[in-house]
Amino acid sequence: MTFLRPGLILILMLTAALTAHAAEPADSTIKNALADIARFEQQSQGLTPARAANAKRILRLLEVSHERLQSSAHQSDPSWQEADQRFTALKTHLQQLSEPGSAAPPATPTASAPVASTPPPAAASAVPALVSGQRVQVKKLIRDITTARERLGGDGPSPFQDAQEVSARQKGLKQFEEALTRYPQLDDPDVQTARAAYEQLRQALSAEFQRAREQLAQLGDAQQRLATIEANSRTYPVPAALTVPFTQTDAAAWADAAGKARTVAEHNLKELQAIAPLAYLPNNPGTPQTGSPYDAQDVDRLQRNSQAALQQLQQGYEQMAADLTSRLTQIENDVLPRFRVDPSGERAWIYLQKESAAEADRTFADALAQARSAVFLEQSLGRDASAAQAVITKIEQARQAFADNRSAALSASRLPEAKSRNKEMLAIAKKIIENPKYEFGDYGPIVLTTGEVVERERKDSEIEIDDADITLSGELKMSGTQTTWTYKWKEFKFAVPLKEAGSDDWHVWWITAKNFSSGGSRTPLNTWVSGEATQGNLILRKNF
């Protein structure tokens, strides 16, 4: 049986596994080196120890070319790794050929159809049997080779995507090869088992390398793809939920941002689902932000982020939609009935008092803004907005009804009936109205709402603390001065329409006239003054 030399075995393995999917040379130095090694490999085919001089000549040229390869700046590139591995393998083969006493010459192989690939034994007549210590070592070698093959696996991302991993495996294979050459006992069953295990490992390594090449061809630049995924997720984040009320522009901007974020998240998930089963990404302690490569943990993180983005988008819309639905329900149940009041009834003041009318205007405006927000949101997402549009119609109808009822109530607004026509009281009221310090302005007819002047009395006290102390029993004792004022006055009430400054509106004011005979230090005494003055309903000038 004829065997190939170990060095030539490695050359054939690398040539079959590497050149079938050779990487494009990264620079001219690597390109020239690949051309040199191809020429040297061709020249070395068929060499035997009898032609050691030729082997030495090729070896010298090979070393010069290999040294030039070291000057390349792309030693991490797959093309450089391929050339370096082929140089090393051929150098080992030529060194064995140039050594005197080398093993029997091999048969002439071809790269496309290699024959056996285990290390050759020494001549059978000169080979002693294994001693017990050697047999223990051979069995351990079998276990080590078998373990190395079993660790290769065959599923998932191949570690051979990493050039350093390939180099380490080739180094291990070389060590096994060198170990086998120390046991030339070809007829020994254990040696035969070791050689068979070595051949299985070599074939498994070649198959795994081929699998890694196919994965890399399918993946492209996985690191760049992952960097693009992360960059896009930062460029198109999930927009925050809008605060009601919002404008049509706000809704359109949110829908646009949400659409882009959804597209990016879905695309990222699709990319990650394609990358995760194929890319060999061993975990590392660093992060991509600090310059470390992406690892499997980063892939998991990016997947979680993309899934979370889709959930946040859905939750953001559902949150806004639920909020708006609740608001529309409240508008229909609370806002719309609130101002449905008979303009001729007891609550007609809702239409005539300035504060209540302003409140109604604010309420209708706020309700419209909320309902329009619901329409804007649904329309921006291409959804049905008819329910919200129906609420808008109801609000506008209610607002118009309020305006109509207000006009009716205003037309019916009148001054109260006079309880007295006492001239002296009317004169006092007129003097108060015309007092410039009160700034009542233009006024209409004065109507007395009480039949006579009444007398009132009230006492107020004020305590000024001079000292405070805590007794042994924990009680707080304070001392000071208490001052008491007795307020005595006469009063009557009247109503009068006053014109609102800066407008043509008239309101009925309810005023109390007072005359104090005693009081505090700042109380005006013995003169008629205005007490409480309260603005009442609107009234038309023609209704005086």
Image (spheres, rainbow, N blue to C red):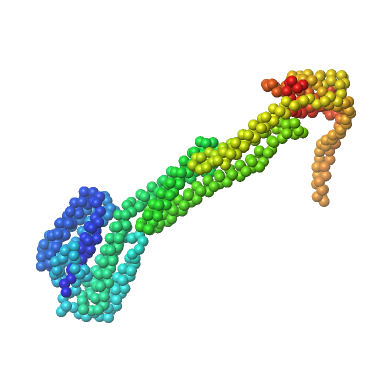
Please tell me which residue lies in front, 311 or 330.
Answer: 330
Q: Relative to 75, does residue 154 appear above or below in the rendering?
A: below
Relative image position of residue 79 (x, y in whole percent): 25, 54
Relative image position of residue 366 (x, y in whole percent): 61, 36
Quadrant of the snapshot with the N terminus = bottom left
Quadrant of the snapshot with the C terminus = top right
Q: Relative to 357, does residue 158 appear above or below in the rendering?
A: below
Residue 453 in sight in this render:
no
Q: Relative to 210, does residue 517 appear above or below in the rendering?
A: above
- Displayed quadrant of residue 516: top right
Please tell me which residue lies in front, 346 or 34.
Answer: 346
User: In the visual, does 127 lie left or right of 508?
Assistant: left
Residue at 13% across, 60% down: 43
Residue at 77% across, 33% down: 346
Residue at 69% across, 38% down: 338
Relative image position of residue 299 (x, y in whole percent): 41, 54
Residue at 41% across, 45% down: 232
Residue 411 in sight in this render:
yes
User: In the visual, does 209 lie left or right of 123?
Assistant: right
